[in-house]
Image (tube, rainbow, N blue to C red):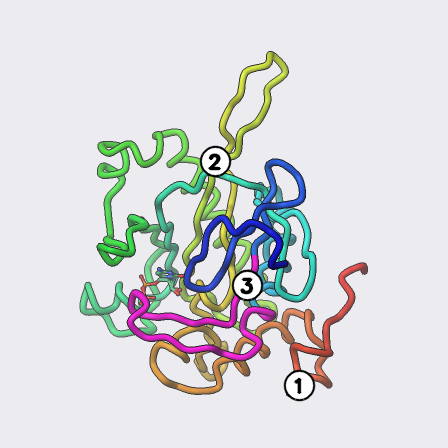
Amino acid sequence: MSRRKQIYEGKAKILYEGPEPGTLVQYFKDDATAFNAQKKAVLDGKGVLNNRISEFVMMRLAEIGIPTHFIKRLNMREQLIKKVEIIPLEVICRNVAAGTMAKRLGMEEGTKLPRSVVEFCLKRDDLGDPLISEDHIHTFGWATPGELDEMIAMTLRINDYLQGMFGGIGIKLIDFKIEFGRLDVQMDNGVTAHQVILADEISPDSCRLWDRETDRKLDKDRFRRDLGEVTEAYTEVATRLGILKEANNKSAPKLSVVSNDD
Ligand code: CDP
């Protein structure tokens, strides 16, 4: 691993050069950060869990026709992905008011929204990822109108699917954040075109997930709000998704990985 060239180090992941051109290796760290990295901790096993959960979600989304950067999982902490040019936007989709939306609009957390809402934030840590409008995106050229339409359509489709997927295991999808990238695609006529594909990760780090019966938080808010049992909650999500074996719940994720070959 150390012989590979590191391309980028983020708060929770590292990207290395991949084995073939056009590929990267995405390594999931145990590091947790919140409030623009003002709060930090190392959560034993978080990276392993997020690698597995994100793999699972990306594979399910690929099955319903969402193009993603995920190629295959390499080991407990790494996955092979397609190299893309990341579009500098965080696309947030919300079904229930929570976090910054609840705060910004003075809504009680847990209020169901009349319909799903898509928001955009500019990916700029130094500015605290500010909320922006579609007009900002057009004006400053962060994405083309066509790319924006595709991102919105994919986000709503992903939301629809994930609400059903998590609903089936007794979990409410409150909100989530996704990122997209541009992939160079060689057309038949030799022209290179850009395809917008889902990138980054989808995990309890980037979603709000509440138990349907108790509203217990099964996501990164446990870390942000010092609720404790963070990796236990992530393990619970993985277990309910069928990624980890029930019996090994306590000792997961080290020994309890279910084979992916089924
Ligand atoms: O999470 P926070 O309260 O700071 O902001 P939010 O806008 O309420 O977050 C909406 C959703 O996007 C939550 O599921 C967050 O976990 C996720 N998010 C993220 O993954 N990364 C960010 N930089 C900001 C939000």
Residue toward you, 96 or 119: 119
Of tags 2 and 3, the one toward the viewer is: 3
Give the image quarter of residue 227. bottom left
Residue 249 against residue 262 in the figure, above or below:
below
Q: Earlier in the sequence, mark 3 or mark 1?
A: 3
Residue drawn at x 53%, y 58% is 162
Q: Give the numbered dot on residue 182.
A: 2
Residue 199: x and y in percent read 51, 47
* Quadrant assignment for ligand 1: bottom left
Are the residues flagged by discs 3 and 1 in contact, CB closer than 8 Å? Answer: no
Residue drawn at x 34%, y 70% is 34
Q: Amino acid at mark 1?
A: Ser
Residue at the front extreme?
Answer: 3
Left or right of residue 118: residue 71:
right
Regarding mark 3 in the picture, which secondary structure is present there?
A: strand
Q: Which residues are magenta?
A: 27-49
Residue 72 against residue 46 in the figure, above or below:
above
Residue 40 magenta: yes
Left or right of residue 55: residue 180:
left
Can you say which quadrant of the picture contains the N terminus?
Answer: bottom right
Residue drawn at x 46%, y 67% is 205
| Cα distance in 3D space between marks 3 and 1 | 19 Å
Are the residues flagged by discs 2 and 1 in contact, CB closer than 8 Å? Answer: no
Q: Amino acid at mark 3?
A: Phe
Residue that mark 3 sits on: 28
Give the image quarter of residue 23. top right
Residue at the top extreme?
Answer: 189
